[in-house]
Amino acid sequence: MSMNLDLIRDVLIQIGRRVRERVYHSLTHQSLEERTSVHAETEEDTIYQIDRDVESIILPELNRHAAALNGVILIAEGIGDEDAVALPHGCDPRDAALRILMDPIDGTRGIMYDKRSAFFLAGAAPNRDEAASLRDVVASVMVELPTSRSYLSDEIWALRGQGAHRSTYNMKSGEIEARKIAPSQSKTLLGGFGQISRFFPPAKEILARIEDQLIERLFPDAPAGRAILFEDQYISTGGQLYEMLVGHDRFVADLRASLYRRIEKEGRRIGLTCHPYDVAAHNIAQEAGVIVTDARGADLDPPLTTTGAVDWIAYANPSIRDEIQPVLMDLLREQGLIE
């Protein structure tokens, strides 16, 4: 069955815009206590009231377009009675043309405290039942969910083989301006922004040690008293990818899944990891030329589910990858994160 990729993109962007409206309304009309109240605890994460506020609009909106999309299986945390919902309502999941992996608000904690933009993320793939994985995604969308102090929101999308595209929506005027996607073309990490994600305990000291050793091995002759590297611990996978897409960051590695596998064997408590829906829009980065791998340097390809832990590493360009990857892989082996 042929797919209308343009229609898929347009539907996902429209849903992202509705989510943006609802989040902005929550920020400007609810108290901090209201939007940060805990709605539910799930196996994957905590569901806050601001999450629930947007989830109530997603199923009706997607159901309205599902027939035109030849049937959809929505895979999104906390939506519906099950993790996967077949739309239009009542359709046989085996007849659906698409699987859509979605994170309605990626970066909930940052946006619910009105600190920093979050992102609506979605990726659509042909329905291959449970065999579907991230490499099957053919259309991806990111919609920025800005804080109450901002009126600009980026909308970014990619269709397989057609590159990545970006526009900025002005929430005051309604104007949309095409913008460039321009990952860094620097040949080196030195002097730029790059980081190993360590925004949640436990075992942050292991990740910090790996990062320190990485920099020491990459730049042993760096002069004393100089800033060798800057970091930005953006508590949003979509936000981290956004910083790569617009050229702000040159390297990021989220290795929490491998880290927690190691410390769990030591009898230590594990923490929150990245899940497949957090990387639902990763092929936007790939279409833009950013290199995204798993912890061992292979293509990132988790199943399209709401469960499971995901490691990912992003390099702005081949030169950055060639500089960092061999040293980083050695360090991960030495620290017991990979074999």
Image (cartoon, rainbow, N blue to C red):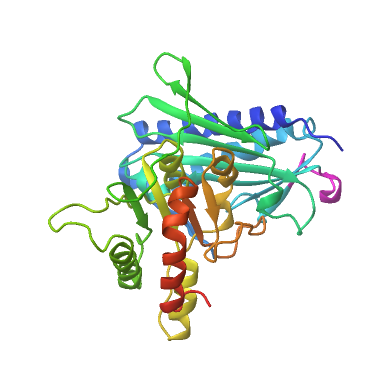
Q: Quadrant of residue 87?
A: top right
User: Looking at the figure, which quarter contains the N terminus?
Assistant: top right
Q: Is residue 149 rendered magenta in the image?
A: no
**Compared with residue 85, is residue 138 higher up or lower down, i.e. above or below?**
above
Q: Residue at x 47, y 26 (%)?
A: 180
The answer to whether 226 appears left or right of 314 in the picture is: left
Residue 49 in percent (x, y) is at: 44, 47
Q: Nearer the viewer, residue 246 or 47?
A: 246
Q: Residue furthest left?
A: 225
The percent position of residue 48, horizontal first and vertical second, equals: 44, 51
Q: Position of residue 158 (x, y in %)?
A: 61, 35
**Does 276 sit above or below residue 49?**
below
Name the residue rendered at 54%, 52% in the picture.
Answer: 292
In front of the other: 197 or 94: 197
Is residue 94 magenta-colored? yes
Question: Image quadrant of residue 161?
Answer: top right
Q: Count the marks.
A: 0
Relative image position of residue 253 (x, y in whole percent): 43, 58
Name which residue lies at 57% across and 52% down: 277
Q: Is residue 25 visible in the rendered structure shown here? A: yes
Toward the bottom, the furthest residue is: 266
Q: Residue placed at 42% from the left, 56% from the top?
A: 323
Q: Is residue 272 visible?
A: no
Please determine whether, in this image, residue 304 is positioned above or below residue 260. Answer: above
The span picked out in magenta is 86-96
